[in-house]
Image (spheres, grey):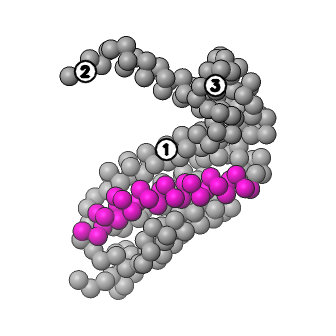
């Protein structure tokens, strides 16, 4: 078995750590000064590294920004993983309640980078960010929660990935523009879009027959 304290392991750890420092610097610069002020020199000053080290990881500032966006989305996926792990089998309404709260908080408690994109009014970049969030979240749901659901219940929608993609992207945009929306409304939208409202106390008459 390989020794985790070998020089190769330490080098790999340092490599990952320096890249993460650069990503944090990108996020900080964008948050404090705006995306339009992002520059390689501004990033390297934050990190305290040379330009050559920056270019070792990224070909330009745009690539670093793209990586920082993915880094932010990784945090969203981790929150989804935690939600998925906490679900109680058979408690579909409970899962709907908790995912509605989670989704609302993910949009309104926006991390620094997507918040700075919205503040800068860069509609193209924000649209691309929403697309990436929706695509990765929908993919994760299809590879985990949907498979679990299908073991015990019939899936009543066609084009499952596409439906989740449209649902997630639409809710992100709606919640952003309507921050006072109640979680019960979000829950109803999710349930009706996925045709699982029959598993809630509001519409028990719509529950599919087994």
- Judged by its main secondary structure, the magenta piece is helix
Q: Nearer the viewer, mark 1 or mark 3?
A: 3
Q: Nearer the viewer, mark 1 or mark 2?
A: 2
Q: Mark 3 near mark 2, Cβ–Cβ under 8 Å?
A: no
Q: Secondary structure at mark 2?
A: loop
Residue under the image location 79 percent in, 40 percent down: 36
Inspect the magenta stretch and tell me whether residue 178 lies in it: no
Residue 111, percent from left and from top: 60, 42
Residue 2 is marked as 2
Residue under the image location 39 percent in, 62 percent down: 142
Whole-number angstrom distance, CA of label 1 to CA of label 3: 22 Å
Q: Please tell me in which quadrant of the rendered image residue 178 appears.
A: bottom right
Q: Please tell me in which quadrant of the rendered image residue 89 appears.
A: bottom left
In-image side of 183 versus 95 (left or right)? right
The residue identified by callout 3 is: 54
Residue 74 is marked as 1
Residue under the image location 68 percent in, 61 percent down: 177
Residue found at the very far left of the displayed protein: 1
Residue under the image location 33 percent in, 14 percent down: 6
Q: Quadrant of the C terminus?
A: bottom left
Disc 1 or 2, which lies upstream in sequence?
2
Residue 203, percent from left and from top: 39, 81
């Amino acid at each position: 078995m390989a020794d985790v304290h070998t020089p190769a392991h330490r080098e790999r750890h340092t490599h990952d750590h320096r890249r993460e420092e650069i990503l944090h610097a990108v996020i900080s610069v964008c948050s404090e000064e705006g995306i339009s002020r992002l520059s390689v020199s501004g990033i390297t000053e934050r990190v305290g590294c040379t330009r050559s080290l920056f270019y070792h990881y990224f070909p330009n500032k745009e690539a670093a920004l793209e990586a920082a966006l993915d880094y932010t989305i990784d945090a969203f996926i981790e929150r989804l993983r935690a939600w998925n792990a906490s679900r109680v089998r058979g408690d579909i309404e409970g899962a709907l309640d908790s995912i509605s709260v989670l989704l609302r908080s993910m949009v309104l408690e926006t991390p620094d980078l997507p918040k700075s994109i919205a503040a800068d009014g860069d509609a193209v970049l924000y649209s691309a960010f929403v697309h990436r969030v929706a695509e990765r979240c929908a993919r994760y749901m299809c590879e985990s929660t949907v498979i679990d659901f299908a073991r015990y219940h019939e899936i009543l929608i066609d084009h499952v990935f596409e439906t989740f993609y449209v649902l997630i992207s639409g809710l992100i945009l709606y919640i952003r523009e309507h921050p006072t929306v109640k979680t019960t409304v979000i829950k109803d939208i999710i349930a009706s879009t996925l045709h699982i409202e029959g598993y809630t106390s509001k519409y028990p008459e719509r529950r599919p027959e087994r």
